[in-house]
Image: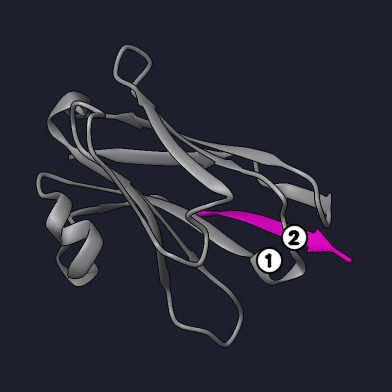
């Protein structure tokens, strides 16, 4: 059983940056592909980014590809999401996810095995 705990959210002005972290415990971290999602009030959950277990392959949603970057540190059991040039529309709860398959993360999130509780990001105008 893998537990995921996000941190790094908060209130930031438009144009600012945040780096989210997600620490995993309870499993073999390096065996899992990891991803980030967000959900704004009244909207569906949205895929943002994914990274393979070795960190060599990443995938991004087109809407954030030029502003966000996913990375991982297998020694620290942590995945990061660097978010730059933030906009008010980026306001949402951001969650990390883990699964053996990056395909589940990028295309069929209903199959994802492990989710974190989420961290709130609020971008003021």
The residue closer to the viewer here, 57 or 41, is: 57
Q: Main secondary structure of the magenta part?
A: strand
Range of residues picked out in magenta: 117-125
Q: Is residue 7 left or right of residue 65?
A: right
Q: Tag count in the figure?
A: 2
Let me know if residue 70 appears in the view. Answer: yes
Q: Inspect the magenta stretch and tell me whether residue 87 lies in it.
A: no
Residue 117 visible, this angle: no
Between 79 and 71, the residue placed more toward the observer is 71
Q: Is residue 116 above or below residue 1?
A: below
Q: Residue at x 68, y 41 (%)?
A: 18
Give how far across and how far down residue 83 sits, in percent. 61, 45
| Mark 2 vs 1: CB contact within 8 A | yes
- Where, quadrant-wise, is the C terminus in this rendering? bottom right
Q: Position of residue 90 (x, y in %)?
A: 65, 65
Image quarter of the N terminus: top left
Task: Give the residue number, with chain letter if any, for mark 2.
Answer: 122
- Residue 54 lies, in percent from the top left, at 19, 26
Q: Position of residue 100 (x, y in %)?
A: 10, 44
Q: Which residue is mark 1?
A: 91
Residue 18 badge: none
Give the residue drawn at x 72%, y 55%. Answer: 86
* Residue 11 located left or right of residue 97: right
100 left or right of 125? Answer: left
Asked if residue 60 is positioned above or below residue 22 in the image, the reply reads: below
Q: Residue furthest bottom?
A: 42
The residue depicted at 20 percent of the width and 38 percent of the height is 52
Depth check: 91 or 24 in front? 91
Using the rendered view, name the quadrant where residue 28 is placed: top left
Q: State which quadrant residue 73 falls in.
A: top left
Q: Give the CA separation, mark 2 to mark 1.
A: 5 Å
């Amino acid at each position: 059983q893998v537990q995921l705990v996000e941190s790094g959210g908060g209130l930031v002005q438009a144009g600012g940056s945040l780096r989210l972290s997600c620490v995993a415990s309870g499993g073999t971290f390096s065996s899992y592909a990891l991803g980030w999602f967000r959900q704004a009030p009244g909207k569906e959950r949205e895929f943002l980014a994914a990274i393979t277990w070795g960190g060599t392959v990443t995938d991004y949603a087109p809407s954030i590809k030029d502003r966000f970057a996913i990375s991982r540190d297998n020694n620290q059991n942590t995945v990061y999401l660097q978010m730059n040039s933030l906009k008010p529309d980026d306001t949402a709860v951001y969650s990390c996810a883990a699964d053996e398959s990056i395909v589940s993360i990028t295309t069929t999130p209903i199959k994802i095995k492990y989710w974190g509780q989420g961290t709130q990001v609020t971008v003021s105008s």
